[in-house]
Image: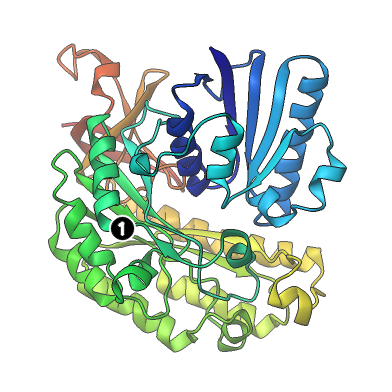
Amino acid sequence: MTTLQVITLGCSKNTVDTEHLLYQVRNSYEIVPEGEVRPVDVLLVNTCGFIGDAKEQSIQYILEAAARKKAGEVGKLMVFGCLSQRYPEELPGLIPEVDGWFGARELDPLVKALGCTPDPQSAHRRIRTDGRHPYAFLKISEGCNRRCSYCAIPFIRGPHRSVPMEVLVKEAEELAAQGVKELVIIAQDTTYYGLDLYGKRCLAELLRRLSTVESIEWMRIHYSYPADFPEDVLEEMAVNPKVCRYMDIPLQHVSDAVLDKMHRGVDGAWTRELIRRMRERVPGVVLRTTLIVGHPGESAKDFAELVDFVKEARFQRMGAFTYSEEEGTFDAENFPDKTRASVKKQRLDKLMEVQRGISLAYNESRVGTEVRVLVDDFTDGVLVCRSEFESPEVDGEILVKYSAQAFDGIEPNSLVGEFLRVRITGADEYDLTAEVI
């Protein structure tokens, strides 16, 4: 059969797109795993076009693929995803070696270009690109109706479109049949789910529906939006044992002045109150957030308030980024980026230094506790695990040294995808070590 390989760049939402695409063309191609280096008849590059670094990485991969095509290692080269959605007119002239450009909203045209017929009845089916791990990302909607001043996603991915619940339940059942134990719920804004289809926010109801899939034991929520946060989600998290006590909620900032310029729809007081309610209504919940430093107009006072907020909120998980001006956004057209790169870096370094101390203190507080973990992998004599308080690919891990005696001779690879009870024995800023009980 004709060989086909897909290189997927960017976020987990792109991974889901790739997996849906692969199912649509499965009968016409021999699918070559992404990490396998060999000549292929067709090479697809699924790109990211969100911020500067991601765009540069995508361009670099495309150029490397074009060089492989010139060398005879690739027959046909096609590019799809966010980068080509964002620059449909500019890219073809810059890299003529590419045989076809398709946007993030053009999967059906890409399927047709590959000589296949799109099957809407199989919209819930995927070919997993990394079936080793017992978790999978479940994308519950596409696009975004928010208009954050710095963000290009709405004009790349289009308006918000929820996936019907019955389709998502079928997809979860398919994933469970393949050994998936954990669903990571993702979208541009998960808390907006359902408004377009059902006239109300339905994330909590979706969680209840997904809970009926017997083999799925954990579900965790990513990419929540603070404005108009649906409180029933907290109720579901507090009572549903399948919903991890974990919330990823990118807050971006806390200064009223900066939040207003960002068009976030909340102020600092709302943000602080939301964090308080989350911890009150879901005891023990772990909160993950992301923050932006150096947004146009961010003063030294605004940044100092952000640092104080991080010290006060003590997020167990936090990431931060320097502001990146993106053409076409409200910021780029109205607030030119005048903050020096050195100032942005200093602020980022200071904020992350504060967070490292908080993260270390939190991890050290867990030493001696017992926790249920899911085994993700076995490598170099160590079982790589996570509890409900660690999300895959973005948080730290719980490492359990394997010995035949401790596990009654059970072959270690057979433990991948199983749940264990462990005791935490050590901690650093990121990872934990543990022993099986």
Asked whether residue 335 appears in the rendered view, the answer is no
Q: Position of residue 342 (x, y in %)?
A: 80, 63
Relative to residue 403, is residue 354 depicted above or below?
below
> What's the residue type where badge 1 is placed?
Pro
Marks counted in the figure total 1
Tell whether 122 sits left or right of 97.
Answer: left
Relative to residue 315, is residue 242 depicted above or below?
above
Asked whether residue 58 appears in the rendered view, the answer is yes
The residue drawn where x is 62% and y is 60% is 156
Q: What's the coloring here?
A: rainbow
Q: Is residue 94 or residue 379 the one in the foreground?
A: 94
Relative to residue 403, is residue 434 depicted above or below?
below
**SS under mark 1:** loop
Give the quadrant of the C terminus. top left
Quarter-of-image position of residue 35: top right
The residue positioned farthest toward the right in the image shown: 93
Question: Residue tagged by mark 1?
Answer: 164
Quarter-of-image position of residue 227: bottom left
Tell whether 48 sits left or right of 400.
Answer: right
Tell whether 432 sits left or right of 311.
Answer: left
Q: Position of residue 220 (x, y in %)?
A: 31, 53
Q: Position of residue 39 (x, y in %)?
A: 67, 13
Quarter-of-image position of residue 368: top left
The residue drawn where x is 74% and y is 67% is 325
Which class describes the residues within 10 Å of circle 1: few (<14), some (14-19), or many (20+)?
some
The residue drawn where x is 31% and y is 58% is 164
Q: Position of residue 141 (x, y in %)?
A: 41, 58
Q: Is residue 94 or residue 233 the one in the foreground?
A: 94
Q: Is residue 351 or residue 341 the one in the foreground?
A: 341
